[in-house]
Amino acid sequence: MFAPHNKYLQSSTIHYKLKYKRILNMGAFLSRFVLVPVLKGILRIYDIVPFSNYWTYTNMLTGLIKLVVHRAVLSRENLYKAPFKDDERLKDYDGKPLKTRPADGFGTDVNNPTTANHLGPIGRNMPAIPKHLRDPHGSPDVQMVATRLLAREEFKPAADQLNIIAASWIQAMVHDWINHLDCDREVTLDKGTSLCPMKKFTFRATLEREDGCFESARTQWWDASFLYGNNDVDLKRARTMSGGQLKTNQDGIPHILPEDKSGLYTTGDKQNSWVGVTILQELFLKEHNYIAEQMSKKYPSMTDEDIFNATRLVIAALVAKIHTTDWTVELLKTKLLQAGMWTNWYGIAKAIVGTYIRPLRDYVPTSLLALIGKKSDNKGVPYCLTEEFAAVYRLHSLSPPGLVVGEGDGTEFLPLLDLFTEKGAEAFRKTATRPTEIAKSVFSYPCGGLYSSNYPVAYRHMTPTDEAGKSLPESRKIDLAALDLFRDRERGIKKFNEFRRLIHLKPYRSWMELTGGNEADARKLELIYGPGKEGVERCDLLVGDMYEKKPSPSFALSETSFIIFLAMASRRLESDPYLNEYYTEEYYTQFGLDHIKSVEGLLDILDRHYPDLAKDFKDSKGKTKQSAFKPTLGPSDWEAAIDKYVDAETKNEWKKTKEGNEKFFNELEEEAQAWAKNKNV
């Protein structure tokens, strides 16, 4: 008797689906052929209008419009889907949301459960250079470029803008986000000159899938895996399995992670790490245990598993919030970008009010354009990070030459190489006061700047580690500057100017334009890559990022890197269900949500666990006077430290590099002039 009714319902459903599909198709058509061209036209106006830089990066209203428009174009044209990767768990997958972040990322997105998980494929923001056109061994040679254009000739600090813990923070985040796999095929670079710390070195090529994509050994979700690890084995090793807590070091020494019998850390991501990252890991370990303890008191019926799961969610959200509203604000120190980043977390009204009248911010509700607490939105492309994102985060020039520790006659300099891997763990334990001295140093001194000729000497002859943090044999030592350049070429990253075009930035027409009128830098680039537009088109991405004039004196990052950052920073937030539809009391507990709201920046966490370190960032009344990512010392303090404490070997290496490069470029200049003279005869 119900057949006619069912038939009617079936017909109506089919009609509705067809109508809905037509609406979607019409929406896609309008977006592609109407909206995107209009938005691109707006970007073009910003390129050609007089005083373009002011309207783009200084004026609040026009700057915010530009950010919104550019991000909208990037989300429609620069998100390339990573290939699907099969997983045996899909056979029994029920599609139900998980109560916490999975250790390996599987099931974070219930509609795309394998995306961005441990060993998942990495996406793209633009087409790769076709494989048959890639030439990582090509001209100019990567070892030569590393020596002549990147190698540190003197230490250039990031003024008084960012401290060493800020540099450590971004390394910790990269250890949270992405790490390529190596294959068994060995590659040798053997064209090192007399100035190269390594004339020859061998490493393994990146493991490539049959479809030409690469995979990440780390989960790509913002899940605090730098603290918790990337799989169930890592996670179980770190937990006490009681009260939702993580293991601490047995001796109660500050700033040190728990270790195994061999002296290797047992908590978090440990590959190629150093003491700065360890300090952050231990700080968030303490914060995890504090939150877990508070939850166990407030919710006595919660099990160990319940407490741990909720606490991990809170920690991951805290990391995302601090990165968005604190670290990035210090990296891009303008009111415009402060408002832009706060908009991502709080919404535009709260952000603008907070930028100009900070005390009133708490009275404005979270509102329009906030990227959290809503329905997650992957823009129709399953979330993953990208090769281009990994490429612009090659920020090794942020690293200092080492750390200045102690006071008065007890002051000494610890070279950077002695602060990595097992040596870093040993450095912590040298004296009873050493952990605190190291922590004091990384919060006090400026880090390195992202400038030309500022790549750390230590990284040019360093020994990588395995996933456990154990150093590989000496035969595996590498020149990381040359390897960075090689990896970009190997993975099909576009050259600098083409990279800019594809992210809707105006390409540079000359070396002088790229360097902002720096004649010395422009001439060096011209002698290495060639003259005119053709030379600029050959420039490697990393080199362009270091030599490009910053769009504002307060920008610590290049414009080109910033635009990829603009696309992917937003995507990490709005694609994540745990920061959106699961950002609720059911998942986090009310205490957890209140705790996230109460934390304004890293300083709040530092003050809770290490109040003596936090004092330097407060005024005489105990109120916050600056971010914990801003140094309490300045460039002049580094100059004094270099003069008095930095070892002669390091300073001689800088001097040798500078003098050798000056001689090299003078000879090239004479050769170029002689060629031009003969040509005109």
Image (cartoon, rainbow, N blue to C red):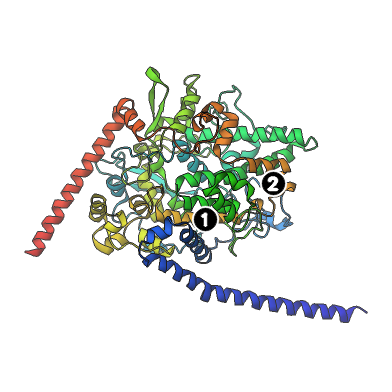
In the image, is 573 to the left or to the right of 617?
A: right
At x 69%, y 46%, the residue is 100
* Disc marking residue 568: 1
In the image, is 261 to the left or to the right of 419?
A: right
Residue 133 position in % (x across, y down): 37, 63
Amino acid at dot 2: Thr
Label 1 packing within 10 angstroms: few (<14), some (14-19), many (20+): many
> Is the residue 433 above or below the residue 302 in the image?
above
Q: State if disc 2 and disc 1 touch (CB < 8 Å).
A: no
Label 2 packing within 10 angstroms: few (<14), some (14-19), many (20+): many
* Quadrant of the snapshot with the C terminus: bottom left
Amino acid at dot 1: Met
* Disc marking residue 100: 2
Frontmost residue, 12 versus 328: 328
Assign a secondary structure to mark 1.
Answer: helix
The image quadrant that residue 294 belongs to is: top right
Assign a secondary structure to mark 2.
Answer: loop
At x 38%, y 58%, the residue is 53
> Is the residue 234 above or below the residue 609 in the image?
below
In the image, is 251 to the left or to the right of 487?
A: right
**Which tag, 1 or 2, sits closer to the chain's start?**
2
At x 55%, y 63%, the residue is 81
The residue sitting at the left extreme is: 681
* Quadrant of the snapshot with the N terminus: bottom right
Residue 89 position in % (x across, y down): 68, 54
| Count of numbered circles in the view | 2
Q: Nearer the viewer, mark 1 or mark 2?
A: 1
In the image, is 586 to the left or to the right of 32?
A: right
At x 41%, y 56%, the residue is 560
